[in-house]
Amino acid sequence: MDMSLLTGETLGLIAALIASGIIAGLMAGLFGIGGGAVLVPVLYQFLAILGVDESVRMHVAVATSLGIIVPTSLRSFFAHKARGAVDMELLKSWLIPLPLGVVAASLVAAHVSGQGLKGIFAVIAVAVSLRMFFNRDSWRLGKDIPGFPIRPLCGALIGFFSTLMGIGGGVMNNTFMTLYGRPIHQAVATSAGTGVLISIPGVIGMVWAGWGEPLLPQFSLGYVNLLGVAVIMPLTTFAAPFGVKLAHRMPKRALELAFGTFLMLVAIRFGIGLL
């Protein structure tokens, strides 16, 4: 990596990363998403300016995002749990399926191109945001979350796609729970717990998947960039509880529209990159 690239422009982007760390922490508490949907596009741009090879750029952004999500999700989860908002029964039933999905995604990540990861990110973000924009209370797959085999299968799929996106599972878990009649506030709170179950094995898997890759930037452990984690992690951890407080003050529809708008902006950003 050419150190001459550490110009005022790069330093400005580092400042943007600091701001993004604060925003991501707020998002983690507000939407239960772990902040990954904010961090991945910002980290991707940061790595591009530093000259990281395009073939590993998206992988590093996704893996580093997962590393940052670990403490953010933990703090967000305990804050929501203290309010009694988390569906602990659902989380306990996903103790095995979610990590299994994460392991499968880690195996796939080593063989998926950066463009492929961007496409996965954009498509899922668009689908979920449209659902939030046009949501109706009548849109239900059932009156309550089903049991075996639908519940463990959905848990595995949430773990799989969330790991490939570098997110904590809130994007899909919020949709899953609300389609089965759960209130958005409970879905958000429970999503913080899915972030814990996804991010910890996800980091381990991404370290393994990228081990020995010669094109990685400095300070990388597998696909996880330790410098990016060190810069952003404290800020996201600090800001998460403030997002939790805001989430519990917002009306249901306002929370849905805010979540949908956020996802659509992220999808547009990655969609432009695919053109």
Image (cartoon, rainbow, N blue to C red):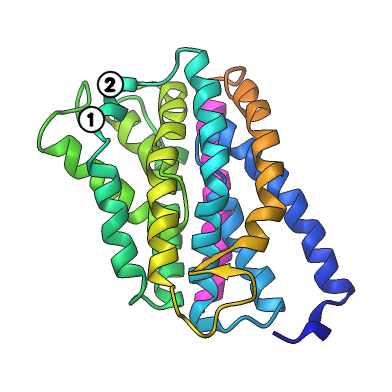
* 239 to 199, vertically: above or below: above
| Mark 1, residue position | 93
The answer to whether marks 1 and 2 mark residues whose Cβ atoms lie closer than 8 Å is yes
| Magenta segment, prevailing SS (helix, strand or loop) | helix
Where is the N terminus found, in terms of image quarters?
A: bottom right
Asked whether residue 42 is in view, the answer is no
Q: Is residue 43 above or below residue 134?
A: below
Q: Is residue 273 magenta?
A: yes
Above or below — where is 264 with respect to 87?
Answer: below
Q: At 68% across and 27% down in the image, what residue appears?
A: 242
Residue closer to the observer: 46 or 256: 46
Place residue 121 in its image quadrant. bottom left
Mark 1 lies on a secondary structure that is helix
Residue 206 rendering spot, x and y as whole percentages: 42, 63
x, y (%) of residue 166? Answer: 47, 56
Q: Which residue is depicted at the point 36% across and 69% down?
A: 109
Which residue position is annotated with label 2? 89
- Say which of 118 and 95 sits in front: 95
Q: Residues within 10 Å of mark 1 (few under 14, many from 20)?
A: some
Q: Is residue 110 visible?
A: yes
Q: Quadrant of residue 207?
A: bottom left
Chain part drawn in magenta? 253-275
Q: Amino acid at mark 2?
A: Glu
Image position of 17 (left or right of 191): right
Q: Residue furthest left?
A: 149
Query: Label 2: how many residues lie within 10 Å, few (<14), some (14-19) or many (20+)?
Result: few
* 230 left or right, relative to 3: left
Q: Amino acid at mark 1?
A: Ser
